[in-house]
Image (spheres, rainbow, N blue to C red):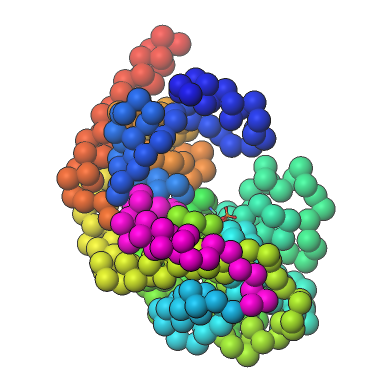
Amino acid sequence: MNEKEIMDLESFYLANVFSKKPLVFTRGKGALLWDINGKEYIDCASSYGVAALGHCHPNIVAAIKAQAEQLITLHSCYYNDKRAEFVQKLVNITPKGLDKAFLSNSGAESVECALKLARKATGKTEIISIMGAYHGKTMGALSLTWDKKYREPFMPLIPDVKHVMPDNSDKIREAITDKTAAVIMEPIRGEGGIRVPSDNYLQQVREICTEKGVLLILDEVQTSFGRTGKLFCCQNWNVTPDIMCLAKPFAGGLPIGITVAQKDLMSTFKVGEHSTTFSGSPIVCAAGCAAIDTLIAEDLSGKAAVDGKYFKSQLEKVASRHKIVKEVRGLGLMLGMELRYDVYGVIMKTLNKGALVIDAGRTVVRILPPLVINKEQIDKVIKILDEALGEEENERSSSSTVSN
Ligand code: PMP
């Protein structure tokens, strides 16, 4: 099939729910992707954070190959060696106290589990979420997500969800009632524009939740796995939630969702109250073991801290040359560049020049490279962004001259 045939087939048979870019990728290695015509791109999107280990990391490839010959699928009503190994490795790296896991297949599912667990454990129904939050698009997770363009077509969603102003712990305190089961938030809002909270915020929220007897759920679907310079983003502020939601990169690119909680909390689920057919498939868990081993062996969180600082400082230099850029922000290799306008033009120009970046809302260019990206690749992306921003500015100034 050629490029056009592939795009036509997908468009014809798949639900039209993704905002597609006209590119067909067929191969990847590390931080690089190649399109069907052999053109090379530097991936600074990692499939929305999934490919944190880069594409086709040899450890992941080897683990999947070996497990594919052994056993691919096995329902969790039986035991499996790779599943046992994976949950042990996982709990060995999660913040102390988060020692029981439920395995699912996506970020939204990890949030669904957290929601049900919070209701079950507290016997309460109310959940406090944050304006600007993104927690996924299944009905429960969608109820917590903020953007009304995602929510309104599907109303009514689950009741008793309140959204409060971000980065203001007083608003959390005011919103809590005797019906509140949990507060849920992303430590750094990803889809909401790479918003890093002020330094004391998360600690204050933790204290309020503890004082009021309300569970704190941290959605680390995008922020974990070393991306922000720590294995889990909450560790940047020494905060441990009661429940943590994980997903994206934890199985080296295979679908996974994970909800971790303290033992007694997770034990409030009785047999049958929560499950999913694919929970902890051996092949996913084998890839997950290799992913965690690689994360630790290559010290990717340490690398993300160092490379993220460098990437951010270079982005700041670029920003200083372009009036169109309002702000650069982020932590580790979770970076955002807010523009004064819609980012579509800059994203497309960057793509055409050989680097993938994504949006985070209408005006923020989001940069989520594989953690294995090297300095030379970062420098290339910086050059491409510099050029793309320059061209966008020129276009905007010439079109405003014309319209004047
Ligand atoms: N929570 C957060 C913080 C996310 O960033 C995402 C996905 N971008 C989700 C939940 C939903 O994950 P999924 O798309 O795998 O359902």
Residue 156 picture location, percent across and down: 82, 53
Does the image show residue 222? no
For image coordinates 54% across by 62% down, the residue present is 72
Q: Is residue 322 magenta?
A: no
Q: Quadrant of the C terminus?
A: top left
Q: What stretch is highlighted in magenta?
A: 49-78
* Residue at 30% over, 29% down: 39
Q: In this view, does 252 lie to the left or right of 361?
A: left
Q: In this view, does 22 lie above or below 115?
A: above
Q: Which residue lies furthest to the front in this view?
A: 69
Picture layout, residue 98 above or below residue 76:
below
Q: Can residue 231 be seen in this view?
A: yes
Res 41 → quadrant:
top left
Q: In this view, does 222 lie to the left or right of 319?
A: right
Residue 400 vertical position relative to residue 219 in the rendered view, above or below: above
Where is residue 93 shown, x and y percent of the image? 40, 79
Locate residue 230 relative to residue 10 in the image: left or right. Answer: left
